[in-house]
Image (cartoon, rainbow, N blue to C red):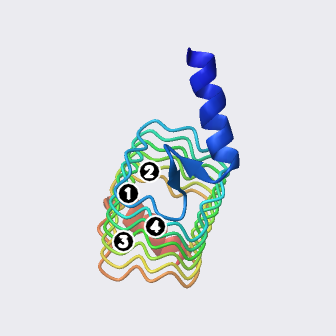
Amino acid sequence: MNEEMSEEKSEQKRNGEINGRSWSNLRGADLEGADLRGANLSGADLTWADLIEANLKGANLEGADLRRACLWKADLRGANLKGANLSWANLSEADLRRADLSEADLRYTCLFWANLRWADLRRADMREVRLNSARLLGADLRWANLRGAHTDWFNRKWIKLTH
């Protein structure tokens, strides 16, 4: 039974759908713990989606709408989030190592304890972002707008050195 279900999910993944829904419209979808490694979700509407502990390693989310999505502890290593809208999203404890967040909208996003090592944040709109205890070693913050960013002492020092 489990093999049959996993084959069905793999088939849906190849066809650009999950649980019978097109990947272009996943507004409010419950994708907690979903395995979406390498999925092409570019331009998808994932507003209010529940992606808690989802595996999005290497996924293409370029230009996706992830406003107010919950990505707590999500694995986004190497994901393409270029130009994605992540405003008001919860990315606490998410793994974003080497993710491309260039030109992304991260206004008011919660990144508590997020791992942003070697992430590309060039030209990202990070106004009022919450970066407390986030790991930023090697992150590219050139031309990022960090006005009003909430950080702890260590990250304030790090941002000042790299920005």
* Residue at which label 4 appears: 45
Whole-angstrom CA distance, mark 3 to mark 4, is: 13 Å
Left or right: where does residue 54 sit relative to residue 81? left
Percent coordinates x, y for residue 80 in the rendering: 64, 63
Nearer the camera: disc 3 or disc 4: 4
* SS of the residue under disc 4: loop
Whole-angstrom CA distance, mark 1 to mark 3, is: 11 Å
* Residue at which label 1 appears: 111
Q: Which mark is residue 87?
A: 3
Are the residues at dot 1 and dot 2 in contact (C-beta closer than 8 Å)?
yes
Give amino acid for label 4.
Answer: Asp
Are the residues at dot 4 and dot 2 in contact (C-beta closer than 8 Å)?
no
**Number of residues whose C-alpha sits closer than 10 Å to that of mark 2, classed few (under 14), some (14–19) or many (20 or more):** many
Left or right: where does residue 36 sit relative to residue 158? right
Whole-angstrom CA distance, mark 1 to mark 2, is: 5 Å
Are the residues at dot 1 and dot 3 in contact (C-beta closer than 8 Å)?
no
- Number of marks in the rendered image: 4
* Residue at which label 2 appears: 114
Task: Mark yes or no: residue 142 visible.
Answer: yes
Q: Residue furthest front?
A: 20
Q: In the figure, residue 157 lies in which quadrant?
A: bottom left
Nearer the camera: disc 3 or disc 2: 3
- Tell me which numbered mark, 1 or 3, is placed earlier along the sequence: 3
Percent coordinates x, y for residue 128 in the rendering: 30, 75
Left or right: where does residue 62 sit relative to residue 126? right
Judging depth in this view, the residue of 135 and 6 nearest the camera is 6
Whole-angstrom CA distance, mark 1 to mark 4, is: 21 Å
